[in-house]
């Protein structure tokens, strides 16, 4: 093991459990105990659950805390191009040497026992956080909340639940209420939770969970408000009003994510400098990210090229709403999705704003939806669709027919990751 790099160890970890997802905390508690419980030695934890907006909200909070002079750990998943993206130690991505050391320690302590890839790699992140000084730890839930491998912090400094919508129904339940109840499993007695915009059914489930465990809630629309007025973002709570620039992350949905981040920073007692930095300095790849350089861009230099990894109906709504705000320009999608997603629910909100769709299969991804199925779903959603052998081939076809168009590559974080690797 001493000479193995992180890629080799990660590959070995994939073989420790027959399933990718198997929700339970028993294996995590066992391994953490073998590691001397690093989860009990973390800097103050901000635990973030929700269906949409977790990563963007985390990025904004991190930008705000760092602007206020704090060193911040951050954990997120999945990664896009490299596993190292999941673990940020005191503001910097974990190095290959440090990651390899953490993975080796976890693999050895696990001693070949049954454990999922996400569980053991989450333990590696917690071990790294415990061994590196910092002021805060931002911990993003992987899936759900109640049985997620991150849900091992006895008393976080703060919890956040971003908007809950339909996704991962096979694991979390087939209604918004059931899914929200699973997300609310991160709530802890006496720990305040910032609650982003929710449906009535979702909010009812979160409030019921909070009442059971004794968790105070700060709820959007009740305890804090956020919105756009002209070219400014206006946030207000019991401490007063804050007038700031619009978020640098594109999309109207980033207003509500900014609101949750600002509510968190307010609750943590951060100074004014943190608020503006949260909305102006955050970076979160593959969320309506404009690609401006790299081989793909160079292959079609007049194309306005975008990338987004959203993959559920709520993400489709957000993308459609954002496309509607952009300057008028022929717009085409290059789309690849997983076979577990509601592709019709995802595509329908975008249909009025796009001219065509090129369907692709996601490279090197066993669970990809075949491109032919994606094209058929797009046609059913009212979008003119065809099949392409690859993203590069699709982009070349679009550029040949419509050289100054807007192109959005979308449908999956796995596809987005392959694009970021390909585009360098």
Image (cartoon, rainbow, N blue to C red):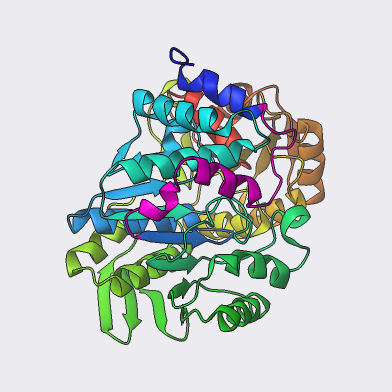
- Residue at the location (68% across, 65% down)? 179
Report whether residue 315 is seen.
Answer: yes
- Residue at the location (49% across, 34% down)? 404
Quarter of the image where one finds residue 313: bottom right
> Which region shows up in magenta?
15-44
Horizontal side of 400 relative to 389 (left or right) equals left
Report whether residue 82 is seen.
Answer: no
Q: Is residue 257 magenta?
A: no
- Residue at the location (20% across, 55% down)? 67
Horizontal side of 232 relative to 377 (left or right) equals left
Residue 339: x percent and y percent?
77, 40
Q: Is residue 42 magenta?
A: yes
Q: Depth check: give the residue in front, 88 or 186.
A: 186
Q: Depth check: give the residue in front, 397 or 258.
A: 258
Q: Does 21 appear above or below 214?
A: above
Residue 121: x percent and y percent?
52, 37
Residue 7: x percent and y percent?
51, 21
Q: Does 413 appear above or below 9?
A: below
- Residue at the location (49% across, 16% down)? 1
């Amino acid at each position: 093991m001493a000479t193995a790099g992180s890629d080799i160890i990660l590959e070995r970890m994939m073989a420790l459990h027959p399933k990718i997802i198997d929700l339970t905390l028993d294996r995590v508690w066992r391994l953490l105990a073998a590691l001397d419980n690093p989860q009990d030695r973390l800097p103050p934890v901000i635990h973030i659950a929700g269906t949409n907006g977790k990563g963007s909200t985390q990025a904004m909070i991190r930008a705000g805390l760092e602007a206020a002079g704090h060193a911040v750990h951050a954990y997120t998943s999945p990664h896009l191009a490299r596993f190292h993206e999941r673990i940020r130690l005191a503001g910097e991505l974990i190095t290959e040497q440090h990651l390899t050391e953490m993975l080796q320690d976890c693999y050895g302590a696990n001693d070949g026992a049954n454990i999922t890839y996400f569980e053991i790699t989450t333990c590696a992140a917690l071990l790294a956080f415990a061994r590196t000084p910092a002021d805060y730890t931002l911990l993003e839930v992987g899936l759900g909340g109640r049985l997620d491998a991150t849900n091992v912090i006895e008393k976080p400094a703060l919890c956040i639940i971003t908007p809950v919508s339909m996704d991962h129904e096979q694991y979390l339940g087939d209604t918004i209420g059931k899914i929200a109840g699973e997300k609310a499993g991160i709530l802890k007695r006496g720990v305040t939770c910032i609650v982003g915009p929710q449906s009535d059914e979702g909010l009812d489930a979160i409030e019921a969970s909070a009442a059971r465990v004794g968790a105070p809630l700060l709820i959007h629309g009740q305890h804090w408000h956020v919105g756009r007025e002209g070219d400014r973002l206006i946030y207000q709570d019991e401490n007063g009003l804050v007038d700031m620039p619009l978020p640098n992350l594109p999309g109207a949905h980033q207003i509500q994510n900014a609101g949750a981040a600002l509510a968190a920073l307010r609750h943590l007692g951060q100074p004014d400098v943190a608020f503006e930095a949260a909305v102006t300095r955050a970076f979160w790849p593959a969320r309506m990210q404009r690609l401006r350089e790299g081989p793909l861009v160079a292959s079609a230099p007049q194309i306005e090229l975008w990338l987004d990894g959203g993959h559920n109906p709520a993400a489709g709504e957000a993308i459609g709403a954002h496309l509607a705000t952009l300057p008028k320009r022929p717009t085409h999608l290059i789309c690849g999705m997983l076979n577990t997603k509601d592709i019709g629910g995802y595509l329908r909100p975008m249909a009025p704003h796009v001219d065509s769709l090129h369907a692709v299969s996601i490279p090197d991804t066993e669970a990809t939806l075949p491109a032919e199925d994606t094209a058929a779903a797009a046609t059913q959603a009212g979008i003119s669709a065809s099949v392409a052998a690859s993203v590069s081939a699709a982009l070349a076809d679009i550029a040949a027919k419509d050289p100054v168009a807007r192109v959005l590559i979308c449908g999956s974080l796995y596809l987005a990751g392959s694009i970021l690797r390909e585009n360098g």
